[in-house]
């Protein structure tokens, strides 16, 4: 009897201490380790601590997230998943299908995420009808950056059609300036390719080709035209482009060696870091054609045990989509907030353009996921497309052969 | 008791490493073979689906390129490194005064990591920064050496860097072999007035056959597992023109979440290794029995 009283008392004591200890805890796996990115993530870390949480940082650098994903796989397989993980695009749904993601609908509904996020971006955060991830930012991919002085000296406006771009590039070539600064890495080839594809195919067919993998569009004459334009682009690149990192290509535009670069808005960070002023030293415009290609970083919450960790997930989700974090983080990172009701007073003119275009394209149905940055397709399919794109760009393959290979590669990747 | 210990201690000492190898080498080979028969994507699954991953593998033009590159790279790398290593070893064997210094200089590249070699050669062979730019600045405006950025020739650029790295090591192997040849035989041949090249081709080299085999085995496995050199030198590019099976497997397993495909490519790589190693083991074992 005495024994069981003691046991009951200690059980109560343990429960009580358990309640008291349910302060939010989060172990966060991410790969934002370089200068500006680390600064951005520290913002979230501080805000989490201010709200009484304990943040365990688990940064895994390397391979554009490959190393982090390997670490994640090992942790999940050993039954010890991190609380929150930087994940994006269809990978979120892929992990949900493995049955390891937590449902954060309670927070999402309380905070009214559905009202403040553009519908197509909200779609990426839902798994089978429940909220399973929190969006951090929106990077636009289809930007063309120009050196203002070089363009003015040659009497060239920022191009709004691909024909204008080609005419401008030919003029620049004649003047001895490299028209397009580019780095020959597969993902950069794919970035240019999808900007060209969006412009030439148009948003509807882009969606059919790179989201739905519609064979008719993949094999269409439009796709041949896209590869034709890619062959032209190859001619506008200098001879030393192989293996060049994107920021070195941005530097070429900055110092006037090259006139244009097609790259996501992280390139803006490079310009700003060098003290260049948007609209004066460098120009930003969406690549020719309608539509908006986005790359949305997000955090997915994994299924974990313990009140403290679940409280941590709730708090973290709430803060990530909170107005303050969305503003401060994106000012640091060069992207724009995912929620549409954040005041943009402190953002630069390129971010204003981006935000306005996002809202417009969201209404027009042309707000589309980037295939090159893993937002539209799963790894095997997007990788198969990139293989063909980069093989075509780096050889003398004909456009028709490229289209045939594209269809074969997509079919083979299923 | 002591006798019992004497008999059993070697077994007990070896047992842990034997078990570890059994599990971590052969066990995981078996696991990979299993996974290669499934539709595993992000995480391994265990329902066997047949040879689908192998069908996909052999239908992939990128895998064809990778295997073709392994063949070109492996053959050229092994042949050139052996010929160059042997040549340097023979030249160093002429009882020259600074042999110690030269030997160290030639052997030193082996001390570098492949990543360092790859990065250095990437710059040396970059047309805008390296050899081409240098020779052009001397006034030879038409000089071109742009193998690194030419998809048809980039794999040969990888061979250059790999040969630079490994031929010093091969030289050290051959130098040891040359020194182990009995001096009396050579002296006898010299007394008989046999020319030096004949001494090498008829006496010394045939007696070094085991060294050739060792050099071949070491270089062959370096070639098959080559990964870091390609990653540092070309990143598999331009396009995927310098992909090797190892980089293909890495891309599938770690970048694309296609574990089944990666496992099937790993099994094919292992088959290639077996094709080289099994005849070697067989000849070794047979030699012992004779």
Image (cartoon, rainbow, N blue to C red):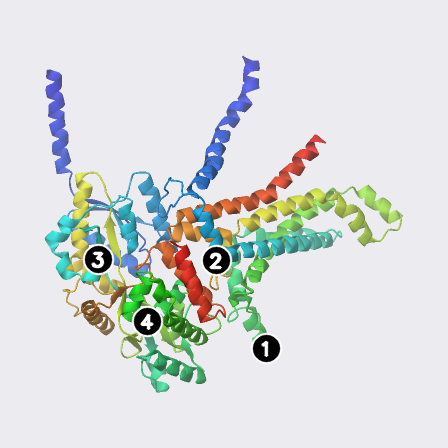
Callout 2 secondary element: helix
* Chain letter belonging to callout 2: B
- Horizontal side of B153 relative to B252 (left or right) equals right
Q: Secondary structure at mark 3?
A: helix
For the residues marked 1 and 2, what is the alpha-carbon distance in whole angstroms?
34 Å
Label 1 Cα crowd, 10 Å radius (few <14 / some 14-19 / many 20+): few
Image mark for residue A201: 4
Q: How many angstroms separate mark 3 from mark 2 (CA)?
A: 33 Å
**Callouts 2 and 4 close, C-beta under 8 Å:** no
> Disc 3, disc 1: CB below 8 Å?
no
Pointers 3 and 4 in contact (C-beta within 8 Å): no
Label for residue B62? Answer: 2
Question: Residue A402 is drawn in which quadrant?
Answer: bottom left
Pointer 3 local density, CA inside 10 Å: few below 14, some 14–19, many at least 20: some
Residue B107 visible in the shown view: yes
- The outermost residue toward the top is B1
> To which chain does the residue with label 4 belong?
A
Q: Which mark is residue B142?
A: 1
Q: Residue at x 21, y 38 (%)?
A: A305
Q: Secondary structure at mark 4?
A: helix
In terms of depth relative to the viewer, which is nearer, B109 or B30?
Answer: B30
* Residue A51 in the image: above or below residue B150: above
Q: Quadrant of residue A275?
A: bottom left
Q: Is residue A65 above or below residue A180?
A: above
Give whichever of discs 1 and 2 has the lower sequence position.
Answer: 2
């Amino acid at each position: 009897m005495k024994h069981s009283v003691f046991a009951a008392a200690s059980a109560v004591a343990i429960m009580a201490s358990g309640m008291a200890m349910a302060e939010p805890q989060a172990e966060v796996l991410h790969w934002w380790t370089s200068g500006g990115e680390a600064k951005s993530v520290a913002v979230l870390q501080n805000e989490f601590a201010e709200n009484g949480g304990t943040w365990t940082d688990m940064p895994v650098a390397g391979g554009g997230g490959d190393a982090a994903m390997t670490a994640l796989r090992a942790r999940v397989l050993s039954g010890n998943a991190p609380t929150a993980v930087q994940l994006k695009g269809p990978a979120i749904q892929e992990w949900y299908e493995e049955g390891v993601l937590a449902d954060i609908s309670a927070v999402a509904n309380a905070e009214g995420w559905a009202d403040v996020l553009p519908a197509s971006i909200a779609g990426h955060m839902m798994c089978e009808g429940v909220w399973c991830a929190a969006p951090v930012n929106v990077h636009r991919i289809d930007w063309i950056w120009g050196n203002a002085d070089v363009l003015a000296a040659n009497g060239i406006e920022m191009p709004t059609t691909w024909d204008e771009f080609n005419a401008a590039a030919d003029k620049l070539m004649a003047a001895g300036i490299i028209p397009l600064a580019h780095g020959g890495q597969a993902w950069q080839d794919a970035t240019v390719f999808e900007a060209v594809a969006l412009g030439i195919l148009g948003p509807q067919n882009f969606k059919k080709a790179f989201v739905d993998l519609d064979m008719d569009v993949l094999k269409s004459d439009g796709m041949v035209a896209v590869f034709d334009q890619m062959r032209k682009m190859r001619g506008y690149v200098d001879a030393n482009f192989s293996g060049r990192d994107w920021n070195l290509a941005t530097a070429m535009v900055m110092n006037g060696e090259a006139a244009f670069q097609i790259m996501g808005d992280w390139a803006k960070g490079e310009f700003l870091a060098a003290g260049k002023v948007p609209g004066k030293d460098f120009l930003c415009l969406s690549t020719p054609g309608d539509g908006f290609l986005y790359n949305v970083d997000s955090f997915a919450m994994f299924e974990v045990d313990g009140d403290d960790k679940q409280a941590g997930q709730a708090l973290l989700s709430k803060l990530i989509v909170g107005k303050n974090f969305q503003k401060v983080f994106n000012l640091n990172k060069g992207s724009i907030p995912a929620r549409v009701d954040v005041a943009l007073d402190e953002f630069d003119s390129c971010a204003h353009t981006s935000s306005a275009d996002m809202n417009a394209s969201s209404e027009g149905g042309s707000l589309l996921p980037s295939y090159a940055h893993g937002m539209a397709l799963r790894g095997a399919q997007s990788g198969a497309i990139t293989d063909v794109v980069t093989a075509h760009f780096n050889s003398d393959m004909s456009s028709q052969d490229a289209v045939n290979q594209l269809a074969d590669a997509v079919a083979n990747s299923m | 008791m002591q006798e019992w210990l004497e008999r059993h201690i070697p077994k007990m000492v070896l047992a842990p490493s034997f078990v570890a190898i059994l599990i971590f080498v052969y066990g995981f080979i078996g696991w990979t073979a299993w996974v290669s028969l499934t539709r595993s994507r992000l995480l391994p699954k265990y329902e066997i689906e047949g040879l689908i991953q192998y069908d996909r593998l052999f239908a992939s033009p990128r895998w064809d390129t990778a295997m073709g590159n392994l063949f070109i790279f492996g053959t050229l790398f092994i042949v050139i490194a052996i010929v160059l290593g042997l040549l340097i070893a023979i030249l160093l064997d002429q009882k020259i005064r600074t042999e110690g210094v030269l030997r160290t200089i030639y052997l030193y590249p082996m001390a570098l990591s492949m990543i360092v070699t790859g990065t250095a050669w990437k710059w040396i062979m970059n047309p805008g920064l390296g050899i081409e730019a240098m020779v052009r600045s001397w006034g030879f405006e038409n000089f071109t050496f742009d193998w690194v950025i030419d998809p048809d020739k980039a794999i040969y650029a990888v061979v250059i860097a790999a040969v630079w790295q490994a031929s010093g090591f091969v030289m050290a192997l051959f130098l040891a072999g040359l020194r182990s040849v009995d001096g009396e035989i050579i002296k006898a041949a010299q007394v008989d007035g046999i020319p030096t090249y004949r001494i090498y081709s008829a006496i010394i080299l045939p007696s070094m056959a085991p060294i050739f085999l060792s050099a071949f085995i070491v270089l062959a496995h370096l070639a098959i597992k080559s990964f870091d050199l390609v990653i540092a030198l070309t990143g598999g590019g331009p396009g995927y023109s310098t992909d090797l099976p190892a980089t293909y497997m890495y891309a599938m397993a770690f970048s694309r979440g296609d574990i089944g495909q990666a496992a099937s490519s790993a099994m094919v790589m292992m088959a290639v290794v077996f094709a080289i190693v099994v005849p070697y083991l067989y000849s070794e074992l047979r030699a012992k029995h004779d």
